[in-house]
Amino acid sequence: MSSLRKKMIEDLRVRNYSPRTIDTYVRCVASFARHFGKSPDKLGPEHIRDYQLFLVESKHASWSLFNQTVCALRFFYKVSLGRKWVIGHIPFPRQEKRLPVIPSVRELKALFNAVGNVKHRTVLMTMYAAGLRISEAMNLQISDIDSDRRLVRIRQGKGKRDRYVPLSSTLLNILREYWKAYRPESWLFPGISPDQPLSVSSVQKVCSIAQRKARLSKRVTTHTIVVTRRYPTTPVAIAIAPSARQEPGQSGLRQGRRSSLVCLISTWCLRSRRASARWPFRTSS
């Protein structure tokens, strides 16, 4: 490991960046240096601009990759190298806005039915019902399920923040049936080793296989399932959403990821369409 790479990793760790972000930043800076065949400390603003043009025009990089590269280079030159010109010469790109893929009730039912393993199916249902990222669902522990207050505690989610999300009666029944079948002790969804959670890649693979088995025309991923939950105008989302009344310490429907206007619309949808909403599965307690 070079001294520059080691210094950058140490700078990121001191600032409490997540291991995944550290890996992404280091990989982006390494790709930048590899493109010119030089050490990054010997490259300047002109090289950065040329590399940005390369990402856009030749590589046709996504906005996500382009933005990650900008963040990584800004951190490397400003923090690790102390270059003061970095702010003005590495601008952020304009974010593209695209509508998400929203599966229908029939498509969600087909997807869940295509998952034969009870644990894997429960993982996907939990992600959808609680609006959890895949890493958040994998890190759930038995003690995080508060059935009395109907809350799920999320430990160190994105941005290393704890939060609570509502626990619907439908999801609670599904989790109870799952617990009766598997009897997990610590992790809610343990992997091959009981003292380790299920891996993210295994769940992603299960979702991909289920999509092919269900013969869905839409590309449904674990991220798609979470995004679908965040659009409560669909009957499936309304059916599993708990009451709009919240308990102390409980955040909004999307935990600060939605404007106040959309929150008002979501609350209206929950109240006006709850009676006619449908959930793909009926699970008795």
Image (cartoon, rainbow, N blue to C red):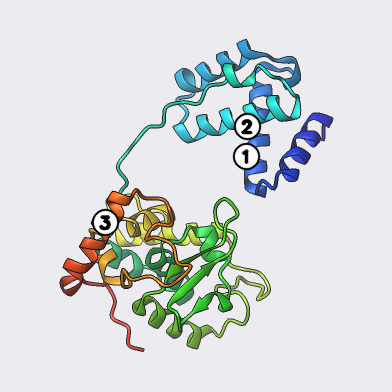
Provide residue 23's location: percent of width, then percent of height: 66, 42
Per the rendering, the mark at residue 201 is: none
On-image quarter of the C terminus: bottom left
Instruction: For the residues labelled 2 and 3, say whether their Cβ atoms are less than 8 Å apart.
Output: no
Rendered position, 201 above or below 68? below
Structural distance between the alpha carbons of marks 2 and 3: 37 Å
Instruction: For the residues labelled 1 and 2, say whether their Cβ atoms are less than 8 Å apart.
Output: yes
The residue depicted at 30 percent of the width and 42 percent of the height is: 99
Q: Which residue is mark 1?
A: 24
Q: Residue furthest top?
A: 46
User: What amino acid type should be assigned to the residue bearing mark 2?
Assistant: Ala
Q: Which residue is mark 3?
A: 264
Q: Which residue is mark 2?
A: 72
Rendered position, 135 above or below 196? above
User: What amino acid type should be assigned to the residue bearing mark 1?
Assistant: Thr
Of badges 1 and 3, nearer the viewer stands 3
